[in-house]
Amino acid sequence: MKFIALEAGQYIFQTGKSEKQWLCQVLHLYPLVGVAPQRISKTATSAEIEESQRMLNEALAEQRAENRRLLETMLNEPDRFRENQDGYRLALEPPQVEWLLQILNDIRLNCWQILGSPGAQDRRYVEVNERTAPYYWAMEMCAFFETALLEPL
């Protein structure tokens, strides 16, 4: 995917046919939830903290459901991807670019958590196997599309 123009307030990207398929595949993973939901506090255990944690988890679940609905709507818009000789032309308004970056980053972060939060600093790496390969692929695809979406910004 490559940024090609800014037209009438929209960012225009060119994707190949395979890239469009990959983007749709990775976006259909949303909302992928990692190993555990974010904790308000790692040490507090009072009933008040537990109630706050429950409310946070509910709010996050509602937000993910709404994002999923909006994502499906966007992907199914007839003019979202316009076919051309090189693949597809994707037009996004600036808020849609930012929102899509957030969705991709959420998928990427959750894949990273599922893979055990690998990183060079602690020398933990992903062993790519039948179980981990789909998450590793999705994590890398998200990085690829995030980089393309950030180009015009």
Image (tube, rainbow, N blue to C red):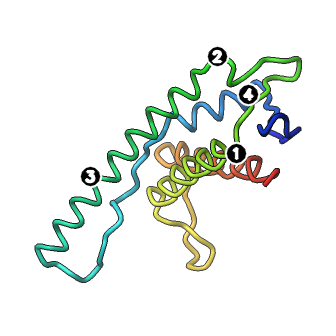
Q: Decide: marks 4, 2 in contact (CB < 8 A)?
A: no
Residue bearing the label numbered 2: 78
Q: Mark 3 or mark 4: which comes first in sequence?
A: 4
Q: Is mark 2 on a helix, strand or loop?
A: loop
Q: How crowded is mark 2: few (under 14 residues within 10 Å), some or many (20 or more)?
A: few
User: Residue type at mark 4?
Assistant: Ser
Q: Disc 1 versus disc 4: distance between alpha carbons?
A: 24 Å
Nearer to the camera, 118 or 146: 146
Q: Disc 3 versus disc 4: distance between alpha carbons?
A: 36 Å
Camera-side mark, 4 or 2? 2
User: Residue type at mark 1?
Assistant: Pro
Name the residue at 19% across, 73% down: 49
Q: How crowded is mark 3: few (under 14 residues within 10 Å), some or many (20 or more)?
A: few
Q: Disc 1 versus disc 3: distance between alpha carbons?
A: 29 Å
Q: Mark 2 or mark 1: which comes first in sequence?
A: 2
Q: What element carries label 1?
A: helix
Horizontal arrangement in the rendering, residue 134 relative to residue 13 (left or right): left
User: In the rendering, which numbered label is found on residue 58?
Assistant: 3
Residue bearing the label numbered 1: 94
Q: Disc 2 versus disc 3: distance between alpha carbons?
A: 33 Å
Q: Point out the image quarter for the C terminus.
A: bottom right
Q: Is mark 3 on a helix, strand or loop?
A: helix
Nearer to the camera, 55 or 138: 55
Horizontal arrangement in the rendering, residue 117 relative to residue 12 (left or right): left
Name the residue at 57% across, 21% down: 76
Camera-side mark, 1 or 4? 1
Residue bearing the label numbered 4: 18
Q: Decide: marks 2, 3 in contact (CB < 8 A)?
A: no
Compared to residue 24, the image places residue 135 above or below, namely: below
Q: Disc 4 versus disc 2: distance between alpha carbons?
A: 18 Å
